[in-house]
Amino acid sequence: MSKNSSNIMALVPKTSNKRETVCIFGTGDFGRALGHKLIQSGYPVVFGSRSPWPSSLIPKDAEVLSHAEAAQKAAIIIIAIQRQHYDFLASLEETLHGKVLVDISNNLKINQYPESNAKYLAQLVPSARVVKAFNTVSAWALQSGTLDASRQVFVCGDDTEAKQMVMDIVRALGLTPLDQGSLLAAREIENYPLQLFPMWKLPIFLSLGLTAFFFFYCLVRDVIYPCVYENKDYSFYLAISIPNRICPIMALVLLALVYLPGVLAAIIQLYRGTKYSRFPDWLDRWMLCRKQLGLVALAFASLHAIYTLVIPIRYYVRWTVEDRTISQALNNKTTPFDNTNGWLSDSYLALGILGFFLFVLLGITSLPSVSNNVNWREFRFVQSKLGYLTLILCTAHTLVYGGKRFLSPSSYRWYLPNAYMLSLIIPCVVLVVKFVLILPCLDKQLTRIRQGWERNPQYSEQSNYIINKSAV
Amino acid sequence: MSKNSSNIMALVPKTSNKRETVCIFGTGDFGRALGHKLIQSGYPVVFGSRSPWPSSLIPKDAEVLSHAEAAQKAAIIIIAIQRQHYDFLASLEETLHGKVLVDISNNLKINQYPESNAKYLAQLVPSARVVKAFNTVSAWALQSGTLDASRQVFVCGDDTEAKQMVMDIVRALGLTPLDQGSLLAAREIENYPLQLFPMWKLPIFLSLGLTAFFFFYCLVRDVIYPCVYENKDYSFYLAISIPNRICPIMALVLLALVYLPGVLAAIIQLYRGTKYSRFPDWLDRWMLCRKQLGLVALAFASLHAIYTLVIPIRYYVRWTVEDRTISQALNNKTTPFDNTNGWLSDSYLALGILGFFLFVLLGITSLPSVSNNVNWREFRFVQSKLGYLTLILCTAHTLVYGGKRFLSPSSYRWYLPNAYMLSLIIPCVVLVVKFVLILPCLDKQLTRIRQGWERNPQYSEQSNYIINKSAV
Amino acid sequence: MSKNSSNIMALVPKTSNKRETVCIFGTGDFGRALGHKLIQSGYPVVFGSRSPWPSSLIPKDAEVLSHAEAAQKAAIIIIAIQRQHYDFLASLEETLHGKVLVDISNNLKINQYPESNAKYLAQLVPSARVVKAFNTVSAWALQSGTLDASRQVFVCGDDTEAKQMVMDIVRALGLTPLDQGSLLAAREIENYPLQLFPMWKLPIFLSLGLTAFFFFYCLVRDVIYPCVYENKDYSFYLAISIPNRICPIMALVLLALVYLPGVLAAIIQLYRGTKYSRFPDWLDRWMLCRKQLGLVALAFASLHAIYTLVIPIRYYVRWTVEDRTISQALNNKTTPFDNTNGWLSDSYLALGILGFFLFVLLGITSLPSVSNNVNWREFRFVQSKLGYLTLILCTAHTLVYGGKRFLSPSSYRWYLPNAYMLSLIIPCVVLVVKFVLILPCLDKQLTRIRQGWERNPQYSEQSNYIINKSAV
């Protein structure tokens, strides 16, 4: 899909060209790749190197000079050197005076040095204008032209004009510059490429923990219990039956955990009677990873859907059905059709299908390109109204699935209830509390609080402000 | 996925900073959130308030002054006040002379006031340069840094330079400004956040209506008829059997309705012999919501797919199969394998699978980020060629499903044909007419018309122009 | 989803407006559509035409003048004329001196003329500043406001300032300009809209060829062999059974072909002892279409999933199950449950489900809007780690599916092994070689090579450079 970048190459301009020369210090992989791309985009490029001889690897149209000579030819100098070799730049201080130095370096570990590489560069050459950029782009992607990964280039720097010049270059290379503010942001920008899904860590660890718990719970109930009491080998349950018990449980619990913090926040606001006090930190963090929680829940729900659809193909199920049919035929016995069972079976399946369908819809609207095209009201409609409808359908699906089994004593082995019963606790709590919260009396007060009303303004931290305000 | 925005925070710059001061009138939620974000992005911020005392809620690095004092400190003033409190701005007319006033207000209802809020502000302070912006962004999203919803900021204003200044700020905040033209566009921009999927209304109401019709149709044929004549209770059909009858019908009908307006347009153009006359309004509107129609059709098709795959798990189906098997075994009777049935069953399933597969492919290419990466020719290839192939496969799927039943009298209860027969009407009409239209004789003429040729130029509204043209 | 573009129309500004007048030569479809859109965005528009009379089709607010008069009114002239009518522009040379001419023309064939249209225009009017733009946008999309297809506008030109002016207009129309460099890029830009999925050609032809081979292979083994030797008619296998044999084979083979080039590249680098020598061309091209290969593989895997889930609904399968059950019942015989079969059946299904799940996850992360929001490390983690895990799961799925059948002689008809056995060759080779490559001894050396180390620097093409470097 991103063929354009590789096909529509801008070729080396041979006619009039008014783009400013760019200097690159360092002829390593990234320096060369960037030089190549800059030449393609019409920039004259000059390399500064300890060994100012042209090499076969350096783009043909680029000049190679000594560091000092190269620096004099350009207003912008890209420092494609590793941090530990920055020292020699201090000796070029005079040449670099007023130049824009672009720090593109990355570290090997998060917070490796006390100060960011860009800050260190700025301290070495205080008279230069340092801009941090390009560190999130890969040399290979630049070279091959297949920017399948991110096209975003984070830029920061203390000098607005210098930053603007660098952002123009970024745009000319077909990338998207994102201004991140002053050079203090360089630390975060340098840590960014070292991150591995930081927002996903909490949801994934949480779901791994819960999965392990429910796995052992089901193992005990469904494999070890029959092995001990009935001497039956159900170990093959490990492949499909138990995963298909865990997946719906996880999907339901995680989906409920998406909506639980919103409910808690409302209770806190109602209790405190103001929205002007901060939520506890854990609640804030929880609210920020709701999207990720929801997507992990969707993954479990999808697995549950496939595991369920695969049921009639399983050898165990086919054998069971055939065995039951044959034994009924041999005993000359037929069971009449039970209308209640027909209703229960069909309605729990229908609830599950509709719930899953809405769940997938929620997932699609959380795709960045889709959510970017809806307004805030539409986004909230989908994520809140449709989200609660999904939660209701999925909870109902589980309740109807339980059906008559809730009270049957055979569901309790070693006093352990069926796992799905445990999974119903959080969703039911969320739904009941939410139902209470939308009762007119509470809803009205909550709306007033969210619009800025306070129950005890004199006790709140806002008191001064409010009193002054009324005095004016 | 959008973790960057929250992690890579631009911190408050403490060194040289050349960004211009921004003034914010009003210390409400949105004003404070915006101020916070502006400071993060390196802008000095000064708040204008009736109560010029710093408050704990206002960002620490911001100054709080009286309205007049604050306004003097900045060239850009963001009016974070509700429209009904705008009056006092008229008294600041002198201070605001030549300043850029950014109207960020929203209304509670579409077209609430005779003129847009931005226009009203421009009338109050005629010497200021009013720009409309930021009204589509949510305070919460700004504050938490999780801009999961849209990053687009619609901007409009009569003064190009003022607009440019505001768009620079928008870009610096990591948002995407979209220039919407003059201040007259403010009305539409103010209505935008109040909209709830306006392009989806027609397709959704249409499909709700059709769904209701087919629901009652199937209810009469499949539940009430057997209840009346055979005294059988098929009420549990309501959960799965009837939905799974309605979904494929709706998918097929809506898919055909996607391609019907194109066929109608071609007939109109052929009949009129020109492309220079406007289509009727209803046709224009229909053509603009084809994508939405297609996606609703895809939703029904997906539901149909899951409902179908779930069939063998249903208690009713399992009971029927077992019952039939047992009664055959008891009667010592086996039915031989019928090769024709094998062919019919397998080919209608295969057609359905391929049709659904292409349908999903169409859906994926309509995702904004995918369609943004294909050129116009590729987009038309997918949406037209693959689209018609999908329609052909789905129609064939339904025809083969009908199979031998079309002529069987048992298919007609109370003279009502099976519902799927009704659903075949529109698709078959579309396909037949399309087939006629691609006959060489008609296709050639249509191509000529679409390239600008006219059958009766002297009668067309274009006549003058054409005659003049040939005279030159 | 893209409703905004049609709803939030910028209306014609009637107050102060500082946008520069734009001139359009030609009143054809595209010229009018562009004029309309420009006026909406606040640009005064003047049309240059051979017939300078206003026509009903031309936007009301636009002036229509003769070419020379119109050209004098604007600094930017959009040439909405076909290339073959460019000649007359040479006679306007004096008027067009220094003006920005925007070439928006397209050709009918790739590389139709020796030079690009923009180059030709620049030769005709050497004193003008020619910019290529807008050729990838459709007139219909501009007019209707539904830019469902691409919003990207490729821009190139030798004059940076002129290009900037055109890119400002592009942005004002709500489109995204992409600077492609000098006018030499015009050739590629003009070819772009004529392309039809160029990056997909190789993967699609490859998969068509392989599909045809496996189709005939399965036809011979599964339909012709039983027809010849057992006189049985299995022709209905063509609809589902054989496709469902081909799809998983194709998915597995293509997925392995995604990872084969990376393994080959590693072997070449290890053998040559350097990363500074170019890969053979076929390997480069192969590596660039890996994403497309993977997506085609995913399509086959999805089809396989649906074909498999549909199995219990097929008449043939239902009949077989009933027939076997009845004959067992009649013979008064029951087969005991085979625990090994239970394990084999469940674990091959579970492996398939997990493999497919990860495969879909890979597909989702390759959506442009998702991959744009992950950093390089995350992208590589997903595409490489998760990708290999998917390959391992899918290969294991096929191996367990084979189960005990590998050695059974009945699997070999006419000495032809089962098709799935053939499909295992490439994945197993890739996995074994990859496993060897991650052995510490080889992995260390490979890492060193990829960091720039060379085994025989004196023999490499880099020798000069390296020697000089150490001499400095």
Image (cartoon, coloured by chain):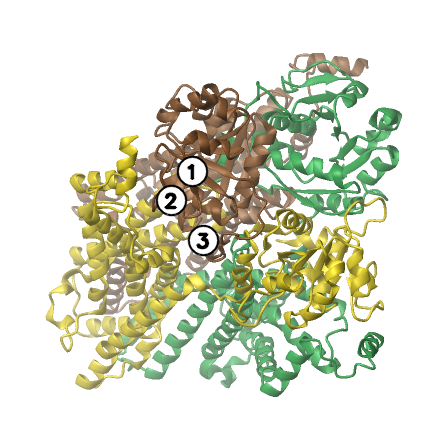
Chain colours: A green, B yellow, C brown
Q: Residue furthest bottom?
A: A441
Disc ID at residue B293: none
**Amino acid type shown at disc 1:** Phe
User: Is B186 displayed left or right of C46 in the figure?
Assistant: right
Q: Position of residue A136 (x, y in %)?
A: 67, 40
Circles 1 and 2 in contact, beta carbons < 8 Å: yes
Q: Residues within 10 Å of mark 1 (few under 14, many from 20)?
A: many
Indicate the secondary structure of the residue bearing disc 2: loop
* Chain under callout 1: C
Determine which residue is flagged by label 3. Answer: C348
Q: Which sits earlier in the primary sequence, circle 1 or circle 3? A: 1
Determine which residue is flagged by label 1. Answer: C47
**Amino acid type shown at disc 3:** Tyr
Q: Is residue C471 above or below residue A237?
A: above
Disc ID at residue C58: 2
Point 52% across, 22% down: residue: C280
